[in-house]
Amino acid sequence: MSAATATPLDELVRELVTAPLNMVDTAFYAVDGARLAATYADSAEKPVRMNDVMQVPLFDSVCAFAPGRILDPNSYPSGGAGMAGTAHDILTFLETIRTGGGPIPGSASVEAMLANQVGVEAATQGPG
C-alpha cells in the first residue's frame, strides 16, 4: 500500500493503525533505549545477550539481527518485523481483535484473521 499511495510505510501505519487506536508508544523506532527489553538469542548452554550485529544459526544458514537499529529514526521501516511498542499498546491492538474489531482492524478483517486459512492438513506439516 505504501508504494500505491506514495506515502512512507511509517506514516501509513501511524495514520491507519496506531493513531486510530491511540497507540502512542508504537513505531518503527524507539526514542528511549532505556525503555527497551534486552534481546537474547539461543545458545547451546543458555541464552546469550545479542550485540548490535548478531548472526544466529537458522537451519543450514544464518539470520542477521541488528537490535540497535530500532533506535535509529532514519533506519528503514520493515513491515515484517520492524516495530517496537509498549505492552499497553500491544494489548490495545489485541483487545481490539478480541472484541471483534474497531476503527482498525474492522470487523470483516478480524473475522478473516480468526478464520482457519490453511485447513486441517496444516496440522500434519510440523511446526511453523
Image: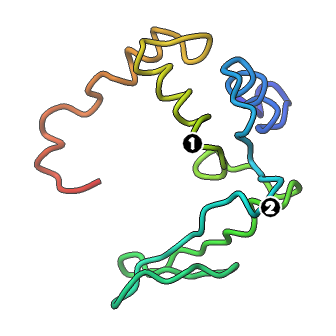
Residue on which disc 1 sits: 87
Question: Does residue 29 sit above or below 64 in this rendering?
Answer: above
Which residue occupies 67% across, 59% down?
A: 36
Which residue occupies 47% across, 9% down?
A: 107
Question: Does residue 34 sit above or below 117 in this rendering?
Answer: below
Residue 28 screen position, x and y as percent: 74, 47
Residue 124 screen position, x and y as percent: 11, 49
Q: Nearer the viewer, residue 31 or 61?
A: 31
Q: Decide: few, some or many residues near mark 2? Use Cα within 10 Å; few <14, some 14-19, many ≥20.
A: some
State left or right for residue 33 relative to residue 47.
right
Q: Decide: few, some or many residues near mark 1? Use Cα within 10 Å; few <14, some 14-19, many ≥20.
A: few
State left or right for residue 31 relative to residue 103.
right
If you read the primary sequence from the N terminus, does the residue marked by circle 2 or circle 1 appear first? 2
Disc 2 residue type?
Leu
Residue that protrudes farthest toward the bottom in the picture: 45
Q: SS for tag 2?
A: helix
Label at residue 61: none
Q: Nearer the viewer, residue 8 or 104?
A: 104
Q: SS for tag 1?
A: helix
Disc 1 residue type?
Ala
Which residue occupies 45% across, 21% down?
A: 97
Cα separation between marks 2 and 1: 18 Å
Q: Nearer the viewer, residue 93 or 17?
A: 93
Residue 54 screen position, x and y as percent: 60, 81
Residue 68 screen position, x and y as percent: 74, 69
Which residue occupies 62% across, 34% down?
A: 89
Residue on which disc 2 sits: 71
